[in-house]
Amino acid sequence: MRVKCVICDVVESINNHIPLAKKLRNRPIHTYMCQTCHDRIEERTIERKKTGNFAEHTPKEETDDYI
C-alpha cells in the first residue's frame, strides 16, 4: 500500500497486512506520518516539556463524595 505523509508529502510503501494499513483503508480520517516527522515532533515535544511551559490538556477526573 502506498501512503503519503501529511507533513512532508513523502510517498512510502507499507505492507498491506499490518494493522496501520487496515486502519488507513477503513477509516479515511486517520492520517499517515512518516517516521522522520514522528521522531522530529516527539523530540521537540520532549524539549518543550523540559522548559516547564508545556501544558498537557488532559481532562480532570471529578471525584464524587458519595461513592
Image (spheres, helix red, strand yellow):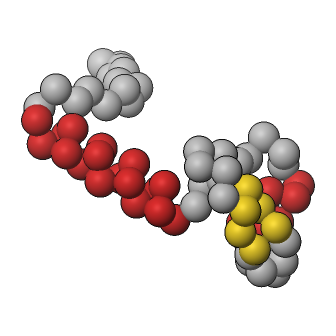
At x 58% / y 61%, what residue is drawn? 34
Give the percent coordinates (x, y) of residue 32: 67, 54
Give the residue furthest to the right: 26
At x 71% / y 69%, what residue is drawn? 12
The picture quadrant where one finds residue 11 is bottom right
From the viewer's perspective, is 55 left or right of 7? left
Please determine whether, in this image, residue 39 is positioned above or below residue 48: below
Foreground residue among 6 and 42: 6
Q: Quadrant of the C terminus?
A: top left
Give the percent coordinates (x, y) of residue 5: 66, 53
Please determine whether, in this image, residue 16 is positioned above or below residue 10: below
At x 38% / y 30%, what residue is drawn? 58
At x 84% / y 77%, what residue is drawn? 16
Give the residue furthest to the left: 51
Please determine whether, in this image, residue 37 is positioned above or below residue 35: above
Give the percent coordinates (x, y) of residue 40: 38, 54
Please determine whether, in this image, residue 33 is positioned above or below residue 50: below
